[in-house]
Image: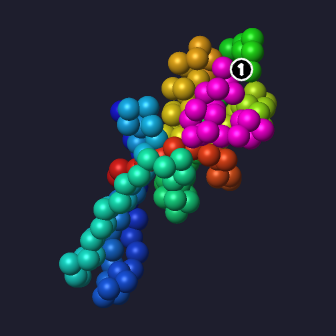
Amino acid sequence: MITQGVQVTGLCSGCGGTTICNVGQFLDRGRLRWGTEGRCENCSDGWCEEDASPVTPEHIRQALLQAHGPSRLRLSGEVPSLVPVLKALRDAGGGLPLGEARARASELAAGGLVGTLVEMEVLAVRLRARAVPVTVEPAGGSAVAAPAARANRSSA
């Protein structure tokens, strides 16, 4: 199982105390999932939220990227046809429109796609299943645009 999480603090909306929140993403049965779980240190407020929607809330993505840095998905061999790449990207993106899938395929072929580790591993699994050779590695740098579509979930 591939997971990535981080603990963040905030202010409790109920009492103004400090909240401790675990957020993250993980790969579950081929799907990217995200989640958040937290509690207030001063009162009884607490929460737990999970989802497998194609889009992880941006505050969770940014917390993961800040704590762990971005990952890059790259082609690691020749791809005789972009058809399997397009199918994998559309499948992982929850029905990503063909034009957006083409743009992401071009990014992948040029320098790679960048996102959270789990986002890139989900794409890697889909691409490898279609015999597209890819690797996932640390990307370095800090600027990461939100992917056009992705399926996520977290667990810290």
- Quadrant location, the N terminus: top left
Residue type, label 1:
Val
Q: Quadrant of residue 35?
A: bottom left
Outermost residue, left side: 44
Residue, x 33% and y 74% (percent of image)? 19
Query: Is residue 143 covered in magenta?
Result: no
Residue placed under numbered mark 1 in the picture: 83
Q: Where 77 falls versus 95 (above or below)?
A: above
Q: Nearer the viewer, residue 47 or 113?
A: 47
Q: Quadrant of residue 86?
A: top right
Q: Which residues, given as a range, are shown in magenta? A: 84-101
Give the x, y percent position of residue 93.
Answer: 59, 40
Q: Main secondary structure of the magenta part?
A: helix
Q: Where 133 falls versus 122 (above or below)?
A: above
Classify residue 85 as left or right of residue 63: right
Q: Quadrant of residue 135?
A: top right
Give the x, y percent position of residue 78.
Answer: 72, 13
Give the x, y percent position of residue 102.
Answer: 77, 33
Give the x, y percent position of residue 28.
Answer: 38, 37
Give SS at disc 1.
helix
Classify residue 107 as left or right of residue 22: right
Residue, x 23% and y 82% (percent of image)? 42
